[in-house]
Image (cartoon, coloured by chain):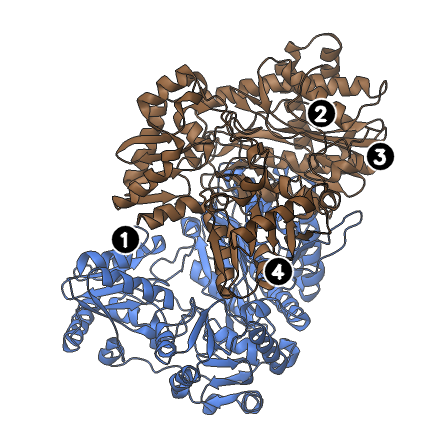
Chain colours: A brown, B blue
Amino acid sequence: MTTHFQTYQNRGGPTYTKERITKLRAELKKRKLNGFIVPLADEHLNEYISSHDERLLWLTGFSGSAGIAIILEQKAAIFIDGRYTLQIQTEVDQSIITPLPIMETSPSNWLQQHIKKGARIGLDPHLQAVSSFETFNETLEKKAAKLISVKTNPIDTIWEDQPKRPQAPVNSHPKKYAGKTADEKIKEIQDHLKEKQIDAFIVTAPESVCWLLNIRGSDVPRTPIMLAHAIIHARAKPELFLDKERMSTRAKDQLSQITKLQLPQKFDEALSALGARFKKVLIDPKRTNSAIYQTLRTARAEIVRGQDPIALPKAKKNKAEIEGMKTAHERDGIAICQFLHWLSETQEKTTITEISAAQTLEEYRRATGALKDISFETISGAGPNGAIVHYRVSEATNRSLKSGELYLVDSGAQYQDGTTDITRTIAIGEPTKPMRKHYTLVLKAHINLTTAYFPKGTRGVDLDPLARTPLWRAGLDFNHGTGHGVGSFLAVHEGPQGISRRAMVPFEPGMVLSNEPGYYREGAYGIRLENLELITEPEEISGGEHPMMHFETLTLAPFDQNLIESELLTKTEIKWLNAYHRTVWKTIGKHLKGAQKSWLKEATTPLK
Amino acid sequence: MTTHFQTYQNRGGPTYTKERITKLRAELKKRKLNGFIVPLADEHLNEYISSHDERLLWLTGFSGSAGIAIILEQKAAIFIDGRYTLQIQTEVDQSIITPLPIMETSPSNWLQQHIKKGARIGLDPHLQAVSSFETFNETLEKKAAKLISVKTNPIDTIWEDQPKRPQAPVNSHPKKYAGKTADEKIKEIQDHLKEKQIDAFIVTAPESVCWLLNIRGSDVPRTPIMLAHAIIHARAKPELFLDKERMSTRAKDQLSQITKLQLPQKFDEALSALGARFKKVLIDPKRTNSAIYQTLRTARAEIVRGQDPIALPKAKKNKAEIEGMKTAHERDGIAICQFLHWLSETQEKTTITEISAAQTLEEYRRATGALKDISFETISGAGPNGAIVHYRVSEATNRSLKSGELYLVDSGAQYQDGTTDITRTIAIGEPTKPMRKHYTLVLKAHINLTTAYFPKGTRGVDLDPLARTPLWRAGLDFNHGTGHGVGSFLAVHEGPQGISRRAMVPFEPGMVLSNEPGYYREGAYGIRLENLELITEPEEISGGEHPMMHFETLTLAPFDQNLIESELLTKTEIKWLNAYHRTVWKTIGKHLKGAQKSWLKEATTPLK
């Protein structure tokens, strides 16, 4: 049997909630703390965290991807968003901890209501962003209470079989994929720091460390990073806090030349040294934990807050990265098409479930021989499960793909040359008229965005409505952003660019973004259509005055024509769809054989 | 001969620049000042100012609508934006004052470069918004220089024949147009203040005073306001600082009941009293001058900065205001159609100039018997003058409307029941193919916006791109916002809503906005198509889940079909155009006779 990256057992559960919270309370009492804040986070404030850092799950039994608990002497609460209101009912023991919707009760407000004057509330400053630490601090000051930064996390003290900190090997990321040497990148960032008169930047985001130094790791699932900090000095070699023992020979050679290698335990000392030399130090408050901030402040460094200066150059893919993304998408497209063919021919013969579908898709990707990981947990939702935007299939929720229903699959891969992310929605059996109408409206929204031309200065906020107006006209909408940035064999969600109401970063050539409008009919079905798009260099237009950028679609897989109501499409939209399917056929068809090939030929037949 | 509101003589000129700046320098020396800052502003930071406040024009000879001068002992500079780089060359004497583009050199930076350590720079705090005062202050502190708030303006001291402060009559604005009594409005604002735990709001924007108290004035051109401050107390009658002598009998009766009437000279005392009672006072820093701020601060009031709480309720027109706007637009539409007919039949017989056209348009509006004022200086631009976005025709620039050229006319009226603002672009003789293409692209942009449906929460920033994507696709764009809010017999430019890259205020039913995309070919022609749009109540859509708002077009006048390239329009766009023209014909046609009527019938013929 093949092993898979994704697992489907229920990770959470209420069995130990009471025992562990009681144990934590005893530990807090020893430390003279009246409460403790437990976020879902690691030191780098990563999206995916290692099993070592799954403290919230261990303590409460809650297995969702976002949440925060506060344990007081008598009361305990766990704050979660709308996605998890149902799931948490079965996962935590509500006799000891109360689930609360975070949109209605903020942790700060709840704290303010439930603590006594003068209370001492503990928090691990390594797991809290500077900004959220400050919010808690202000709250407690109002009650004359104290926020105590603990030196060691009390959960680590009581968690006997806590997994070790990850120490996975760190490898060099070859120049042929990176496109630039680490030296060139370091110089670019140093020039930027000099221009801004900043002495040093604390690199806290592991994707930034990886991109800058052309290395990759596997300390956390789904994102090929290692957990390591770095300091870029404007006028000296960067310091990298990473044990040499973990590096491949090539990585060690490379890193020894371009960085000053330090053991991780030397990081605090290095921060203090910056202060002692009165350095002007840049931090990104969204990705920097409070422990770092406090160390710098205590050492009297001059702290400047601003966006990670690596984020933008990392987002603007260079020629080699673009080539890599294209190769990765061709490879991924073959796997996706094989999967879609399998789905089409198997659905009438055998029962397919959400899990078996996701596993089969992973197997096709693995068969490429290039799969390093999946880029996030596959969202494999049949029927009503498809309407749950961030659905994660588990053995408890697994559903079979039934005739007359829709199946939504949102998945991605990590290959050494690029990261992918694609969503398709497929009719199982014969779709209903409303399904076809809604699918076609989402497709119109997708096409309206992908065909846009836009000038220098355009931001995600400006294009977001293009993927909504066709839905708005029908009285429909979707309750999530339209697109996120994607890394190059790095994080599948990666800023600074995005497409949403809040996306204020101007677009630049080389950025990659998802285009993923959707429609969700609660209790019935979900539709989402997602391709990744590359922003082109500005192009002169005949008769025009301003060169315009546009999107070049990277993702290669057909849209389900059984779900398209062609009367709802304009001529221009049909033209785009046919041209896209022609490209899919030309690029992917040649890699397929037999039944798979005939299926793709059929699936990409031009719409009249 | 009819008198007109708009005048066309050159108001500025370099004749007195030297004499007056020299005189000012002597006055500054007496006052021991090393320099003085001269903005184009009045105490209320209004868009249009009275002749009493035309200090910048009197001193320098510059007649543009935005600018700021700084007079030092040896040097003097005037800062202007891109619109005025040519005009200023002929208007100021450059041997004594240097025009500088404000986008390249900010007044603050220039000051910093040119003043000596310890310099004393004067500024009239009544004419400077809190925020810009603070910018100057920071700049001067860097040079150890001092910003001196003068008690009396030195220009007023030397300006012998300075017009008096305006004292025009103040009239009641009838309930049938206002829709609500002043009492109801006051209560609404007081409730808002109580909820925010604020004791008083200083009403500095005269439009806000007028709207709140249902009064109107004529102290400045183009906007029917009087220059008066008010204070709304959360728990007491509002104070209005306005001389009873200026009020009509009805206005006096009305205001005596609902306000505590005070003489304008009591305003400072009232501000100080707020401080003495430790009140929490709200000011809008964009519309509050520094003198007010300083008085409050000296008196130790607790100052809270925020948006004028009257702005939003004023923007959301009630039923009576909406009815009034519709009646005003029907009346205005008749005048516009008569003008367009005149233009069409006269252009071949006699020479029409930009001035004679603007005057004729004003005469048609005056003939309605209801015209109180025009709502802004008519932009009447033939050929290349049409490409100047904020063109103001004067005798010096007046141009005749030549065959083969385009004519752009952007104009509006103040009627007691509503304010209008419309732009049409007309072909004189036979248009060229590029003219038709560009006109049609702008029309597509206009239609794309006007036909949008949008949910609760949508902001101007979200809809702005809809009026651009058709142009972007052709490599074109326009360098201004797409729309501004419009008052109800108040300012023609009125927030807080707008349609632009920066417009972050959510739309609400009852708001009125302009929809005015354009295209400007420098040195050749300008195209702009502007209608006012009313935001409807959210409507249920069959098969939809979210009620959607949309626009209801208020403006009624045909688009020039000679300029439409129908092959560039989609079926949906043609359908919208024909429906709009049908409405124009049905609403306006019945008021016209003879040749005017036949012309409108022809002009509104459906496009095939």
Residue A383, image x, y percentages: 80, 35
Q: Residues within 10 Å of mark 3 (few under 14, many from 20)?
A: few
Please state which of the two labelled residues, at mark 4 or mark 3, is closer to the viewer: 3
Whether residue A502 is visible to the viewer of this picture, yes or no, is yes
Residue B485, image x, y percentages: 54, 62
Residues A279 and B597: in front is A279
Q: Residue at horizontal 82%, vertical 21%?
A: A347
Q: Which mark is residue A432?
A: 3
Q: Secondary structure at mark 4?
A: loop
Q: Residues within 10 Å of mark 4 (few under 14, many from 20)?
A: many
Q: Secondary structure at mark 1?
A: loop
Q: Residue at horizontal 53%, vertical 77%?
A: B210
Q: Quadrant of the C terminus of chain B?
A: top right
Q: Secondary structure at mark 2?
A: helix
Q: Which mark is residue A358?
A: 2
Q: Earlier in the sequence, mark 3 or mark 2?
A: 2
Indicate the amino acid at tag 1: Thr
Please state which of the two labelled residues, at mark 3 or mark 2, is closer to the viewer: 2
Q: Earlier in the sequence, mark 1 or mark 4?
A: 1
Q: Chain of mark 2?
A: A
Residues B323 and B346: in front is B323
- The Cα atoms of the two marked residues, 2 and 4, are separated by 56 Å
Q: Which residue is mark 4?
A: B555
Whether residue A608 is visible to the viewer of this picture, yes or no, is no
Seen as rendered, the residue at the extreme top is A594
Please state which of the two labelled residues, at mark 1 or mark 3, is closer to the viewer: 3
- The Cα atoms of the two marked residues, 1 and 3, are separated by 64 Å
Residue A124, image x, y percentages: 50, 46
Indicate the amino acid at tag 3: Thr
Q: Chain of mark 1?
A: B
